[in-house]
Image: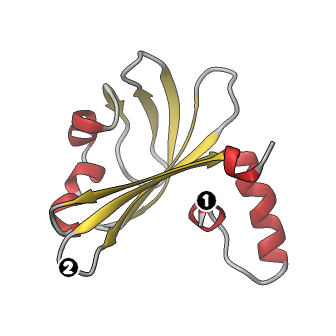
Amino acid sequence: MELHEEIVRRDVPLAVDRETAWPALADPARLEEWFARDVDVDIEPGAEGTVTDHDGAVRDVVVEEVVPERRVALRWRTGDEPETIVELTLEDDGAGACRLVVVEVSAALVRAVSTRLVAAGGAHGPALVAA
């Protein structure tokens, strides 16, 4: 399998700045408006809960990282499927608005690449892998 088949990346332009867009990532009720049918987890590092997709699939989720007005990283899995990491990142577009970058990648791939990059003195994470 090719590396690009292991990674899903979507860029969504938003007509608002990061400060205005942030609640749509940080508030579970707002995430339910666009991201999933049901979000039962606090958006804070280490929080555990569930996210129910629009198709009814229930994912066990752990919030890995939260950078206010910038990024939320989640680790999740459905049943016995492999665990993945999802990053929701708000990036400025240079014109006063922002875009939402969603990256989903296999947790095993992130661990493998991160181990090698850290050993070589570099950074790590799914956004780096997807770049």
Specify the amino acid type for callout 2.
Ala
Which residue is pictured at 69% across the width and 45% down the height? 6
Neighbourhood count class around disc 2 (C-alpha, 10 Å): few under 14, some 14–19, many 20 upward:
few
Per the rendering, the mark at residue 95 is 2
Q: Residue at horizontal 81%, vertical 66%? A: 115
Q: Quadrant of the N terminus?
A: top right
**Residue 9: percent from left, percent from top:** 51, 52
Give me the residue at 42% from left, 30% from top: 51
Colour setup of the view: secondary structure
Label 2 to label 1, Cα distance in Å?
26 Å
Q: The residue tagged with tag 2: helix, strand or loop?
A: loop
Q: Earlier in the sequence, mark 2 or mark 1?
A: 2
Find residue 32 and report its horizontal and vertical position in percent: 26, 33
Q: Position of residue 39 (x, y in %)?
A: 34, 32
| Residue 48: image location, x then y, percent | 48, 38
Q: Quadrant of residue 116?
A: bottom right
| Residue nearer the viewer, 109 or 62 | 109
State yes or no: discs 2 and 1 in contact (Cβ < 8 Å).
Answer: no
Q: Closer to the camera, 25 or 103?
A: 103
Judge from the rendering whether residue 90 lies leftward or rightward of residue 111; answer left or right.
left
Query: In the picture, residue 114 is in which quadrant?
Result: bottom right
- Viewer-nearest residue: 35 or 50: 35
